[in-house]
Amino acid sequence: MEFLMAGVAACGACVLTNPLEVVKTRMQLQGELRPRGSYPRLYRNVFHAAATICRADGWAALQRGLLPALIYQFLMNGIRLGTYSVMEDAGYTSTEDGRVSGTRCTLAGALAGVTGAFLCSPIYLVSLVVLKGGQGGAWPCPPSIVT
């Protein structure tokens, strides 16, 4: 149940913050791999970037990449919090006398986080490629993801 609740909560947050992620990614990618000043600056600031994206691509462009981002957030947070909950219920975060151990909690949290990150990193890569925009549709073929 914790897996489901964590995933749904993360998806709710994702819907609200995805436009900021789109704007941030587009601003970071402007002039990628070029020396400063040798490329035209498309975006002056966050507000200008959001307005420019809406004018050029429409309001829906602010939710570009929402599906892979929702899948990523649901799985990542569901796995992290669900795994930690299972370890907590199994008693791995407590000492033999029943007290909560900071060290064991930290190790359980680290293991849960590493598990979620490892399993979900390919989905995150797909969401970044989709956020980049203008790269041949929403689901690029694998070679375009690797290069």
Image (cartoon, rainbow, N blue to C red):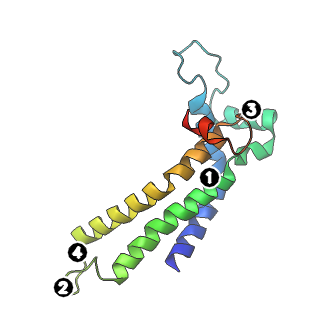
Residue that mark 4 sits on: 101
When the figure is inspected, residue 134 is found, relative to residue 75, above or below; the finding is above
Give the spatial CA distance, label 1 vs label 3. Answer: 18 Å
- Quick one: label 1 or label 3, which is nearer the N terminus? 1
Picture disc at residue 52: 3
- Quick one: label 3 or label 4, which is nearer the N terminus? 3
User: Within 10 Å of the Cα at label 1, are there few (<14), some (14-19), or many (20+) other Cα atoms?
Assistant: few
Q: Nearer the viewer, mark 4 or mark 1?
A: 4
CB under 8 Å between discs 4 and 1: no
**What kind of residue is marked 1?**
Thr
User: 59 left or right of 130?
Assistant: right
Picture disc at residue 96: 2
**Looking at the picture, how far across and down is residue 42, in whole percent?**
68, 24
CB under 8 Å between discs 1 and 3: no
Give the spatial CA distance, label 1 vs label 2. Answer: 42 Å
Q: Residue at x 72, y 44 (%)?
A: 138
Residue that mark 1 sits on: 17
- Quick one: label 4 or label 1, which is nearer the N terminus? 1
Q: Quadrant of residue 144?
A: top right
- Quick one: label 1 or label 2, which is nearer the N terminus? 1
Q: Residue at x 23, y 86 (%)?
A: 98
**What kind of residue is marked 4?**
Ser
Please tell me whether mark 4 sits on a helix, a strand or a loop: loop
- Quick one: label 4 or label 2, which is nearer the N terminus? 2
